[in-house]
Image (cartoon, rainbow, N blue to C red):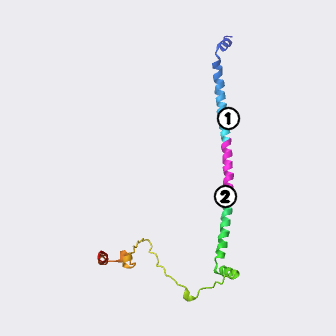
Amino acid sequence: MARNRSRRNQSGTVWLIPALKAGVLCTMLGGSAVGYVLQKNELHQLGRTITKREAVLERLKWENKTRAQHLANLQLPRSIAERVRDQKMGLMLPLPGQTIWLAEPAPDAGKAVVVLHSASVGGTPVGDRSRSEKAADADSRAK
C-alpha cells in the first residue's frame, strides 16, 4: 500500500512527461510519413511530366525531320523549274556568258592571318608592303 500512496502523492507533471514524449514521437513519425508520401507523389508527378515532354520532343523531332525533307525537295532544281513553269513567271536559265564564277582561295589550316588594307595604296595589303614602300607612302601623304 505504500506504493499506492506514493503514486497518489506524485505531482501531475511526472505523469505528463511520458505522455508528452509519446505524443512528440507519434507526431514526428506521422510527419515523416506524410513527408514521405508527399515526396513520392512529387516524384511520380515529375516522372509523368518528363514522360510527356519526351513524347513532345520526339514528335517535334519527327516533324522537324519531315519538314527538312520537304524543304530539301522544294529546293531541288527540278522542283523549282516545275514551280516556275506552273506559275508562268517567264524565268529561264541564264546564258553561259551571263554567269560569273568566282574562285575562293583555300583557307590556311591552323594559321589565322589578319590582313589590313590601305585605301591610299589602292587596296594592297599593308602587311605585304616593304618598309621603303611604307616610307614612300608616308612621304607622299606629308606633301
Q: Residue at x 65, y 73 (%)?
A: 71
Closer to the camera in the image, 67 or 10: 67
User: Mark 1 — residue?
Assistant: 30
Q: State whether residue 25 is above or below residue 63.
A: above
Q: Nearer the viewer, mark 1 or mark 2?
A: 2
Q: Earlier in the sequence, mark 1 or mark 2?
A: 1
Q: For mark 2, give the secondary structure.
A: helix
Q: Are marks 1 and 2 in contact (CB under 8 Å)?
A: no
Closer to the camera in the image, 22 or 139: 139
Disc 2 residue type (three-letter): Glu
Question: Is residue 39 covered in magenta?
Answer: yes
Q: Position of residue 58 (x, y in %)?
A: 67, 62
Q: Residue at x 65, y 43 (%)?
A: 39
Disc 1 residue type (three-letter): Gly
Q: Residue at x 70, y 81 (%)?
A: 86
Going by the image, does 128 lie left or right of 13? left
Tell me which segment is drawn in magenta: 37-52
Q: Quadrant of the C terminus?
A: bottom left
Going by the image, does 121 lie left or right of 52? left
User: Mark 2 — residue?
Assistant: 54
